[in-house]
Amino acid sequence: MSWQLGAPAAVGAAFLLLPLLALVTRAPWRSLPEHLSEPAIQTSLRLSLVCATAAAGTAILLGVPLAWVLARSRARGIGLIRALVTVPLVLPPVVGGVALLKAFGRNGLLGRWLDEAFGVTLPFTTTGVIVAETFVAMPFLVLAMEGAFRSIDPGLEEAATTLGASRWFAFTRVSLPSALPGLLAGSLLAWARALGEFGATITFAGNSPGRTTTMPISVYLAMERDPDAAVSLALVLLMTAVIVLVALRGRWLTT
Amino acid sequence: MRRTSLSLSVAYSVAGVALLAGCGGSSGQTSSTGSTSTTSSASSSDTSAATSSTTAAGATGSITVLAAASLTESFTTIANDFEAAHPGSTVTLSFGPSSGLATQVVNGAPADVFAAASTKTMGTVVDAGYASGPTNFATNSMTIVVPTKNPAKVDSLDDLTNPDTLVAVCQAEVPCGAAAATVFGNAGLTVKPVSEEADVKAVLTKVSLGEVDAGIVYVTDAKAAASDVTAIAIPAADNATTKYPIAAISKAPNPALAKEFVAYVLSDAGQAVLAQAGFAAP
């Protein structure tokens, strides 16, 4: 290992680890249980967990078929569609929130129709939080699954269909089980991403305790009210992230 | 690389990063909160980002002013006028919720002047030792704003208690949120907002976009956004006022120019701009 590689690598690792170390060492460990048992915090924690799980679930229901189409279709514009559905990955979250407002807000493209026809409004509701989180988290799942589907030997699926299996049967009994590691990795990533979303949720769903105040918003509010409480909450989110990544053990970068 | 050399390398690198972090930030640029504040630079064409220096004609150089979001329009004008009156000076403005800005100052943001929308948020900075001797330079009061089409037909405070009316206010820690709570308390009403926004301009945006039916903002914000929203007055008996203090920050990079800016805001010229925007006298 040459020093030209080792030294910057060490600096890079130190740079990424230092903030996390600082958070852990500067955390008010003694008052941690007290902060975490505040009713407002418990409510936002519960809301965050529920919404992130619902968002990951929606991402799976919609993202797995989408990933399948992207992996198997040979249509002309498929590359463009793939690029577009991964835009939320690099879009600044607040921009995502603004775009969601323009689409699903009360005066939005689809939102206006939803409001007039069904009286359904998404902004400022818990459903709105789930919509915003799904928007930012689904691309993770789609990418992971597409990679997983691509790496399945197409001969397996062909064999299934020549032996009389329907397309759906072949998908559920052959393709999906083969892509299971990708599904697990993608779902965990999508869940973690949904849990940590701030910009899109606060812009689209707003901030209302019990209904739309998620953990990241609670951390932001706590920074202005009681910085110690903010660090305690930040620790919870950090621990969650660490657990998810350790569980994945680096297997989320699909070939 | 052997194990011992690698760990030595890491140790040196961590020390190096710590050293670099220690001698950071000597220029007068701002750090602003991610999604809530806007930064605008009202600099004239022939100025450079030089550090402080005092000449016989007055201080020059650049300063950073952290100001409450409700001061956006008036302080932009004041900063432009100040630079014209003090050739060679640059004023960089950073707007946001007063509580968020106070947190920035207390965490060491390199700012020269802090103008808050409440004495409470200024108190946070003074108590932490980052400013002393704040002076009140304006007063503001609240108003209801509705989208121009007023879909929920709101015409008084009482209408805000209607469960079908979507109301947005500022977060309770932000001065305009505290003032909104005072207004509702004075009127004896229980209002359940659908959203508590990060600063007053965010409330204004939600109203002007038509996403909510009504919001509580400052009268100055309603005046500034007269083309996007309609204001509905709150009876004086129920209304809440808030005082705006300004102070130079203690360990400011450019204390001389900071002092002059504070003096300018308090002068007739500065007060005229504020009065024009709809602020009341301090």
Image: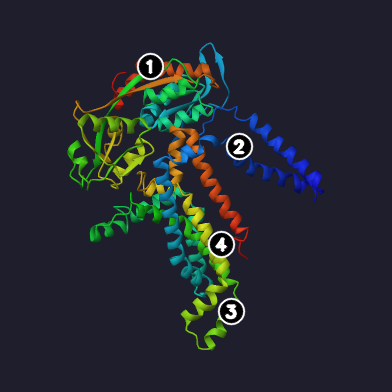
Judged by depth in the image, the label closer to the viewer, 1 or 2, is 2
- Mark 1 — residue? B266
Q: Residue B87, how many percent across, how many down?
A: 49, 20
Residue B32 visible in image = no
Callout 3 and callout 4 share a chain: yes
Q: Please, which chain is the residue tagged with disc 1 on?
A: B
Counting residues from the start of the chain, the first of labels 2 and 4 encountered is: 2
- Mark 4 — residue? A185
Judged by depth in the image, the label closer to the viewer, 3 or 1, is 3
Q: Which mark is residue B89?
A: none
Q: Please, which chain is the residue tagged with disc 3 on?
A: A
Give the quadrant of residue B185.
top left
Camera-side residue of B64 and B241: B241
Q: Residue B268, how many percent across, how many down?
A: 35, 15
Counting residues from the start of the chain, the first of labels 2 and 3 encountered is: 2
- Mark 2 — residue? A25
Residue ID at (52%, 75%): A74
